Amino acid sequence: MNCEKKVSNALIRRLPKYYRYLSTLQQMRISRVSSKDLSQRLGITSSQVRQDFFHFGGFGLQGYGYDVASLLQEIGCILGLDRTYNMALIGAGNLGQAIAKHSSFEKRGFQIIGVFDANPHLIGKQIKGIDIQHYDQLEDFVKRHSVDIAVITVPRIYAQDVMQRVVDLGIKGIWNFASVELDVPEDVSIENIHLSESLMTLAYEMKRKKEKTQKRSKPL
Amino acid sequence: MNCEKKVSNALIRRLPKYYRYLSTLQQMRISRVSSKDLSQRLGITSSQVRQDFFHFGGFGLQGYGYDVASLLQEIGCILGLDRTYNMALIGAGNLGQAIAKHSSFEKRGFQIIGVFDANPHLIGKQIKGIDIQHYDQLEDFVKRHSVDIAVITVPRIYAQDVMQRVVDLGIKGIWNFASVELDVPEDVSIENIHLSESLMTLAYEMKRKKEKTQKRSKPL
DNA sequence: TAGATTGTTAATCGATTAACAATC
DNA sequence: TAGATTGTTAATCGATTAACAATC
């Protein structure tokens, strides 16, 4: 019944924020929330909050607000968090190992079931009880296990090749940490974590704020 | 002369992408690029590319295109990459250590000069030749060194406190990896890397594409 | 009932795209 | 000069905000 209208990218990016805040509300045993509460917390207008939920059919009750538990469930369902995802991590360097050890994804149903690297010194070592296997064994592993998402934490120069291999093996989700724009086929989803882009954006913001402050303190 | 018109968030996010691609072009010794080339590479329209650069005054030459070297320099300057940034990393857990060891930021002028943690077992160990110091020594360190950016890689529950401390010490830039929305003062810039939000977005995209494929293969 | 707050349409705002004159 | 490609304005598109009727 929903999913028909186009969902803007901006809205998609807000959904996890709603989800996260609603989770904390639930932990705090708060059962009810208004669009105004939500808007203040996320720094947007209450109009937008209502418009966002209306987009998916509207989950609230006039004069009351939204029920935290059911709203959380609805958004979780929209986001596809009502299932688990198996992930294979490729590239067991510093970042890859840190991601693999990061436990908070598991709670949301994202579990790393295989770790791969091409460096022979790493093969056989364990991360969180998972053996690091050689990259050549990826194909075999994917055939024997259901892998939903490939986490790419290899150096940038290998990223395109790894992506191609992963796509050829039929994996439809890619979480890419290499700082390259990967061209994926239409039926494959990709999410990028571009650390250096984030730092550049931070530098830009800092520069702009500094200029503004200086201009204010030194008027002509 | 520039910086007067408002720069949209969407445009700010494109600047690092231009910058990165121009860097690779320069490495490949390609000295000239057209808005069409750039647009195809980044998956946007050439109109937008020209509009983007026009926003900052226009860096091209009619009938020729853009000079890679000078465009790179201009964008670097806009982004504030024409200087170096000293960073203090707070939270030397898995993710923190991985970030500290990640060498690619240094090349762009972002250098980690101090690492802090509250865990006594970590104090005195080294990451890339930098001693891990106790969090209590942060204040002293900031007084003796120029710290531009604080990298927050502590568990989410401590993030708000760490942010407050860092802001009180006069640091104007925060790179936050904890999955909370931090309320920073107006003169402080913050960039968030929200890994779990990224994963949720990926889950959403995968779900949507799956539905589309199923609908196509099983029409009523 | 009166008060509160959503659902929903319409208005506004801003970003993207189209178009073409300018000019190298 | 002719061809190419930007600079720049105008048109379009889409997202956000405003407003208020609906209704709990």
Image: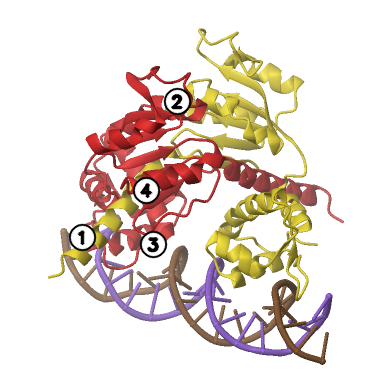
Chain colours: A yellow, B red, C brown, D purple
- At mark 4, the secondary structure is helix
Q: Give the residue pinned by disc 3.
A: B47
Report how far apart the C-alphas of labels 1 and 2 lie in the structure.
35 Å
Q: Which mark is residue B97?
A: 2
Q: What element carries label 1?
A: helix
Tell me the quarter of the picture where residue B202 sits: top right
Q: Mark 1 highlights which residue?
A: A214
A220 sits to left or right of B189: left
Other residues around mark 1 within 10 Å, as few (<14) / some (14–19) / many (≥20): few
**Is residue B62 visible to us here?**
no
Q: Label 4 to label 3, Cα distance in Å?
A: 41 Å
Height in image: A55 above or below A9? below
Q: Quadrant of the C terminus of chain A?
A: bottom left
Between marks 2 and 3, how big is the CA–CA gap?
42 Å
Q: Is residue B133 left or right of residue A210?
A: right
Name the residue tied to disc 4.
Answer: B167
Q: Position of residue A12 (x, y in %)?
A: 61, 55
Of badges 4 and 3, nearer the viewer stands 4
Residue A41: image x %, image y %? 57, 60
Q: What residue type is labelled 4?
A: Val
Residue mark closest to the camera, 3 vs 1: 1
Protein chain holding label 1: A
